[in-house]
Image (tube, helix red, strand yellow):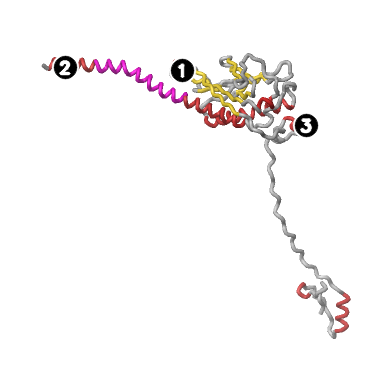
Amino acid sequence: MQTELAKQFSEERGATILEFVLVFPLLLVIVFGIVDVSLMLSTESILDEAVHRSVEQAVIMINLDLDVRHELSDSYSTRRLRLAREKVAQEGLGFLDRVRTIQTSLEEPDIQARAQLLPWNFTETTATANPEVTKVGLLVLRPGECGTLIRSSAVHCNRATLGTGTTAQAPIQAQKFLMERHPIKVIAAVEYQSYLPFLQGKILLAEAYAYRQAVPQGPFAAWEDPQLLDEGPPLATQPPERTPFPAPKMPEEEEFQCVVSWAKCLVEMQNSNVGAQLRPINEDVDGDGFCDCQ
């Protein structure tokens, strides 16, 4: 009897261990999968917030509608447009740097980072024969413009509302005319390193559109405008601080000096039987400012 019970208990224990060995890896994959997918969705949400912040800055940024197709790459208009793009992109990059979930360094990427911002190649259309190719983290596209994702060589354009594809010729209208009728696009890409093999190296894309608002156009502030920096003396990188006016000081009272009137003393000596002597004391000064004599 005891032998049969021991044999039955041994068989049940072996079955339990076998079931655990078969189910535990699957359970581990499910748990890691839930955590990993949650982190990936969180990263995608942060990237989406960054591009929305940049596009909100783009709709009110001055000099973003400059047409530089007939300008050289080092002209003031081209440099102002480049500065406007950098200020728009910096709005989103600054948010990513504060959150610290996505690695934003393009020159020295961190291979161990969970999420790495991918660079884009963008070429400004100017009259220069060989225009310079710019590497950016957040791509700011005006209507009709395109950029290339270096990681996958994929071309992304802002031509959805124009009805043309990536291989079509750029529109001939001026950017000011196009931006009144078509939106601005900001796009960013992140390479996500996952625990799961089928999500390893997945590229996350986030893009945002917005129509430009009517804002006054003109140069940037004096301490950052390219033309003013070249024409004038070196300016400070920050606006000058205002120094308060000093508090007014009341004039100090001068000590009264007694003035001796010898003529008055002689008259007093003649009218008096006793000799007069001078008393240069302030309390005895008469109304004319002369010392009294006795």
Q: What x and y, as percent, mark residue 14? A: 24, 15
Q: Which callout, 1 or 3, points at the residue further toward the start of the chain?
A: 1
State which quadrant residue 221 falls in.
Answer: top right
Residue picked out by circle 3: 231
Residue 216, given in percent of the width and then of the height, sits at: 69, 35
Q: Residue furthest left?
A: 1
Marks 2 and 1, Cα distance to the nearest angstrom? 48 Å
Q: Tag 2 or tag 3, which sits nearer the N-term? A: 2
Kindly state the secondary structure of the residue where label 1 is placed: helix
Q: Amino acid at mark 3?
A: Glu
Q: Amino acid at mark 2?
A: Ala
Measured in 3D between alpha carbons, the distance from the residue under mark 1 to the one under mark 3, in whole angstroms, is 54 Å
Please state if 152 lies on the left or on the right of 246 as rendered. left
Q: Identify the disc placed on residue 6.
A: 2
- Work out whether 98 lies above or below 193: below
Instruction: Answer few, some or many: residues within 10 Å of disc 1's Cα (few below 14, many 20 plus, some between 14 and 19).
Output: some
Q: Nearer the viewer, residue 4 or 73?
A: 73
Overall secondary structure of the magenta section: helix
Circles 1 and 3 in contact, beta carbons < 8 Å: no
Upstream in sequence: badge 2 or badge 1: 2
Amino acid type, residue under disc 1 in the picture = Leu
Q: Quadrant of the N terminus?
A: top left
Magenta residues, as a range? 15-40
Which type of secondary structure does the marked residue at label 2 adopt?
helix
Q: Residue at x 74, y 19 (%)?
A: 127
